[in-house]
Amino acid sequence: MKNIYILLFLFSLGVVAQSFLYQHQPTLFPIVDAPLNSENHLPKKWRSTKQISQLVGNYANLKGLTQLHLSGSGQFSQEDLKNMSQEIKGKAFVLDLREESHGFIDGTPISWTDGLNYGNVGKTLRQIELDEQKRLKLTAQKGSIIVDLSKDLGENFQKFFVREVKTEKELVESFGYTYIRLPITDHHRPVDSVVDQFIEIVLSLPADSWIHLHCKGGKGRTTTFMTLYDIMHNAQTVGLNDILSRQTLLGGADLVQAEKNETYKQKPAKDRIEFIRAFYTYCREVPNFEMTWSDWVHQKQLVAYQTSSSN
């Protein structure tokens, strides 16, 4: 009943007109992805392999960690990205792990959600980009947008007057960084083809370049890929438990404990940690990556993972 009242309220405000861009798409509502007027100078869940003071007193294995030139966070605002530039040195690559449609209104990050961030499951990257562009264009043409500022849909609405809209690619490149996107379904492990892409990206990075990873909240997807990056560089000399532990201590999610949640996230979390364990074995067995992840999965007769279970 509450959802019906929320929908009627949104309809009266004209939000539904912004949400239904396609007749057969799920209803997606615009929300703000970062705190407004936050006193924090960096995005939520910010952590960096340059800043490891919290690990020193926890008996963490630090071998190879500070050499990674790696950082992670939740979704940043334009101001956050400006502040991040003081932390990120040299040639920087921003890897966007979000599958859900998102963009920026006057520097404020917003996204369109169904409540679970499953609105783009099954879409190609190009389809997602086109969806974002259409939503941002419609928002710019309308001149205003009503967004939800709360974590729970229907709790705290605010009207934004729109002067400028940008995709994340446009914003990131305006700072001189290279933008890369690998869309991952929220709460899930990456599909095998994306794992192959990620390995190719990492292997192609120039020496001493910096890579920043982010998702929406800076927890599941960001921690997963920071862990994969750590594994690729250190699997030969550092144990998996040590890598998982230090990524958690840096400020990431505890990917091992996450599988114990008795929610819709439990099965994806279990699949994710099993994937990470398999990826560690792959990196141990194929240290030079002369065999792709997908080929290794086939050789080991493991179950191929081609789409998230939310599809």
Image: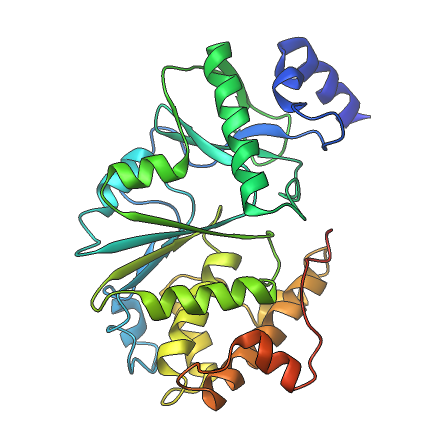
Residue 150: % across, % down: 55, 31
Residue sitting at the far right: 1
Picture layout, residue 109 above or below residue 137? below
Q: Is residue 248 visible?
A: no
- Identify the residue shown where x is 28% and y is 34%: 79
Picture layout, residue 169 above or below residue 68? above
Residue 147: % across, % down: 53, 23
Q: Which of the colour schemes (rainbow, by chain, secondary structure, one colour) is used?
A: rainbow
Given residues 26 and 264, the one toward you in this image is 26
Picture layout, residue 272 above or below residue 1? below
| The N terminus lies in quadrant | top right
Q: Is residue 69 visible?
A: yes
Picture layout, residue 126 above or below residue 7? below
Determine which quarter of the picture holds residue 242: bottom left
Determine which quarter of the picture holds residue 152: top right
Given residues 124 and 302, the one toward you in this image is 124
Given residues 251 and 138, the one toward you in this image is 138
- Identify the residue shown where x is 54% and y is 30%: 31
**Total numbered labels placed on residues in the image:** 0
Residue 19 located left or right of residue 229: right
Residue 225 located left or right of residue 93: right
Residue 100: % across, % down: 56, 42
- Identify the residue shown where x is 65% and y is 80%: 298
Residue 179: % across, % down: 35, 48
